[in-house]
Amino acid sequence: MKVVLLAGGFGTRLSELTGNIPKPMVPVGDKPIIMHIMNLYAKYGFNEFIVAAGYKADYLKQFFANYSLVNSDYSIDLSTGDIKIHKAPSLEWKVTIIDTGLETMTGGRIKRLKEYIGDDRFLLSYGDGLSDVDINSVIDHHDKQGKLLTMTAVRPSARFGELIIKDGKVTKFEEKPQLHDGWINGGFFVCENGVLDYITGDHEMFEREPMDKLCLDEEIAAFQHEGYWQCMDSKRDHDKLNDIWESGKAPWK
């Protein structure tokens, strides 16, 4: 399965760090947070990524285009520009970067990737959240539930939107309400291709109209993850993630 990563937002709540770079490129330790997310998927054997870029898309493109050279030993013939790689990085990943537009909402970004996703099911994640979730377990749960969409539900603090879950199905998605059971959308989705039919265009946030319609049709399953999850929504979150990384005990490692 291909992994779609949403990486196009402005990151305004982390403006101290996103003035010149997109949020997924903000470093946690020695690498951008998006690389930590990709490493999680690669751990479970998923190494084909489609990145939905937008804000500072050129930065993302340059990073991945230059990754092999920056992380390799090589010789270059300056008269011709020919490069011979002596020691290449060990990552066997395929990364596709698509500029999905500066103002496009999350649903629209996913819809714009349709030709690159093809007709298959796909995995989907935000570009700013880290977790120790077992991706294979999410997929197994998705297969058992037989829904179009499975989202990973997590239990952080009450400043996020909340999921209402009954009998393993998402019955309602509320944007930052008073908490009932404490479960929220943690991303790390498994999507059947039919999910794309619920998105009408660039103006739609995936978390609103498409998810509302999927909920009404009882087509969202919840994988309830009790382990580690942390998004990078503020400078405080960024500092917390870096402190955990520097401790050598990062749960997502």
Image (tube, rainbow, N blue to C red):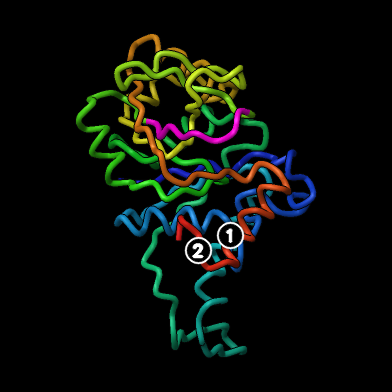
Residue 194 is left or right of residue 188, and the answer is: left
Percent from the top left, x then y, of residue 42?
A: 36, 58
Q: Position of residue 92 (x, y in %)?
A: 36, 67
Q: Is residue 1 above or below residue 32?
A: above
Give the position of the C terminus as an image quadrant. bottom left
Q: Looking at the picture, which amino acid does disc 1 mark?
A: Ile
Q: Left or right of 116: which side holds 15?
A: right
Q: Can you tell which quarter of the image residue 139 is in?
A: top left
Q: CA distance from mark 1 to mark 2?
A: 6 Å
- Horizontal side of 39 relative to 118 (left or right) equals right
Could you tell me which residue is drawn at 61 percent across and 65 percent down? Answer: 29
Residue 154 falls inside the magenta stretch = yes
Q: Position of residue 110 (x, y in %)?
A: 48, 33
Which residue is rendered at x = 64% and y = 29% of the image?
A: 159
Q: Quadrant of residue 99?
A: top right
Mark 1 and mark 2 in contact? Answer it, CB < 8 Å: yes
Considering depth in this image, is 206 or 253 the residue closer to the camera?
A: 253
Residue at left offset 58%, top offset 59%? 244
| Residue at which label 1 appears | 244
Provide the secondary structure element on which disc 1 rests.
helix
> Relative to 77, is 89 above or below?
above
Magenta range is 151-158
Q: Which residue is mark 2?
A: 249
For disc 1, the neighbor class at 10 Å (few under 14, some 14 to 19, many from 20) is: some
Q: Nearer the viewer, residue 118 or 72?
A: 72
Write the residue at 66% across / 47% down: 237
